[in-house]
Amino acid sequence: MLNVHQGDLIMIDAEPHAGHEMGGHNPENNNIRRPFLVMSRAGYSDKSGLVVGLAITHIHRDSPFRFSIIDFESKIDGDALLLQLLSYDLLARHGKIIGHIHSERQFKSILKQVQNIFVDETIESD
């Protein structure tokens, strides 16, 4: 089992996919791997073998649902997509840790937005 933690940047096999799911870059050329920002806690991954996180695209766009991720070590330069919160089997999808988000402040900001997806909608917001 990989020792994966919140904020890790991983590469994972993203094919096959369906509908609006974010897939790999070009399956015809056997390029099925996609960068992914891990949002789930290590304990969750250890017990389930799954990681929950955000797909990362290579295109930067201005949107409240996208977060710029630039990591020179892993060569990731793109946007983490809030609208692509996904769960993958780390081993079955050949997950490999390639880096870690360096700004704790940035990670906490992204985590807050992910948590907002699950706020009880029956509670009025302030």
Image: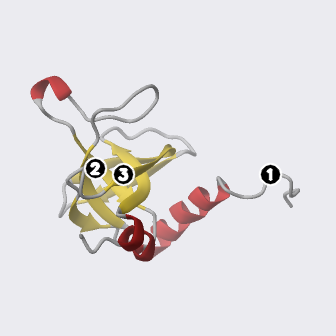
Q: Badge 3 is on which residue?
A: 88
| Residue type beneath disc 3 | Tyr
Q: Position of residue 56 (x, y in %)?
A: 35, 47
Q: Secondary structure at mark 1?
A: loop
Left or right: residue 110 compared with residue 31: right
Q: Nearer the viewer, residue 54 or 75?
A: 54
* x and y, in percent, of residue 118 in the image: 67, 56
Amino acid under label 2?
Pro
Going from N to C along the chain, the mark reached first, 1 or 2, is 2
29 or 46: nearer the eye?
46
Q: Is residue 48 above or below residue 22?
A: below
86 shown above or below 22 = below
In the rendering, which numbered label is found on residue 35? 2
Mark 1 or 2, which is nearer the eye? 1
Secondary structure found at label 2? strand
Label 3 element class: strand
Which image quarter: residue 70?
bottom left
Front disc: 2 or 3 = 3
Q: Residues within 10 Å of mark 1 (few under 14, many from 20)?
A: few
Q: Position of residue 68 (x, y in %)?
A: 41, 52
Q: CA distance from mark 2 to mark 3?
A: 12 Å
Tell me which numbered mark, 1 or 3, is placed earlier along the sequence. 3
Label 1 to label 3: alpha-carbon separation: 26 Å
Residue drawn at point x = 22 percent, y = 64 percent: 97
Q: Which residue is mark 1?
A: 121
Q: CA distance from mark 1 to mark 2?
A: 31 Å
